[in-house]
Image: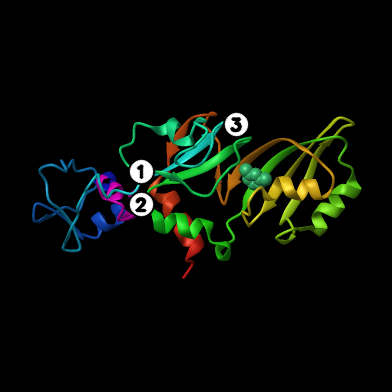
Amino acid sequence: MQKYIADCGLTSRRRAEALIARGLVAVNGKIVSEPGVKVDPEVDQVAVEGKRLEFNPATAKITLLLHKPVGYVSTMSDPQNRPLVKDLYKNFKERLFPVGRLDINTSGLLLCTNDGALANQLMHPRYKFEKEYRITVNGKFAEKDLKLLRQGVELEDGFAKPLRAELIRSEKRRSLLTLVIAEGRNRQVRRMLRALDFQVAALARIRLAFLTLDGVKKGAWRRLRAAELERLRMLANPE
Ligand code: URA
């Protein structure tokens, strides 16, 4: 039952258990105060604090964490007929759109959702959700370049300063670094590196806020758990 309450989008499974324990959940008009009771959404009427829960697949909110491979575009259609990220989760009837964009040549973490309010919160610069990128650049990225990057660079749409930048490996032909930014301007990471005369050979988003790609292979996805959705909403609305 706690799973059903969570699936209806009311709260996390753990909080649903607390509601049950507090005697606030009724099944077919009777208070049920132990967790684990089986309910059939087609037959049973579940009410929380007197309000009946509705599980409507047409309006259910779904959010996926997708590991985007290189070569897929993150728009809902493409005039050039290139592969779309939505092809990677085509079994959903719901229209799940990517939250923001990753370039066709960028891989990594992309949320896809039909929850417009959540998407707006995640994309709004006010909320400053951290995005971490792993970047391979051509050539030797030296300590002095790192210092310049950390100071911030001037782009044509304004100054851009990373929250953090770390040099992982610096070799003559290739270097590897990580960069954390809170904004998401178009091609921002590539343009920041370009401003320092470096060309990006590979770019991957490896983290969004507390979400990582752990356990999600390239081209695969998983659904966000209710507790993760709640945590994202809390980050956007801490009060
Ligand atoms: N910055 C870029 O340059 N490209 C992306 O895909 C994401 C961030």
- Indicate which disc, 3 or 2, sits on the residue closer to the N terminus: 2
In the image, what residue type sits under mark 2? Ser
Q: Residue at x 73, y 53 (%)?
A: 164
Label 3: few (<14), some (14–19) or many (≥20) C-alpha neighbours in 10 Å? some
Labels 1 and 3: the sequence-earlier one:
3
Ligand 1 lies in quarter: top right
Q: Earlier in the sequence, mark 2 or mark 1?
A: 2
CA gap between label 1 and label 3 equals 22 Å
Q: Which mark is residue 12?
A: 2
- Which residue is depicted at the point 40% across and 55% down? 116
Which stretch did the figure color magenta?
4-15
Q: Residue 43 in the image: state x and y as whole percent.
A: 10, 43
Q: Residue 212: x percent and y percent? A: 56, 42
6 relative position to 160: left or right: left
Callout 1 crowding tier (Cα within 10 Å): few <14, some 14–19, many ≥20: some
* Gap in angstroms between the C-alphas marked 2 and 1: 23 Å
Residue 117 painted magenta: no
Residue 95: assigned label: 1
The residue that appears at 36% across and 45% down in the rendered structure is 62
Q: For this view, does 27 lie left or right of residue 222?
A: left
Residue 70: assigned label = 3
Distance from Cα at disc 3 to Cα at disc 2: 33 Å
Q: Nearer the viewer, residue 177 or 30?
A: 177
- Depicted 181 relative to depicted 103: above or below: below
Percent across and percent down for residue 206 are 62, 41
Give residue 90's quadrant in the image: top left
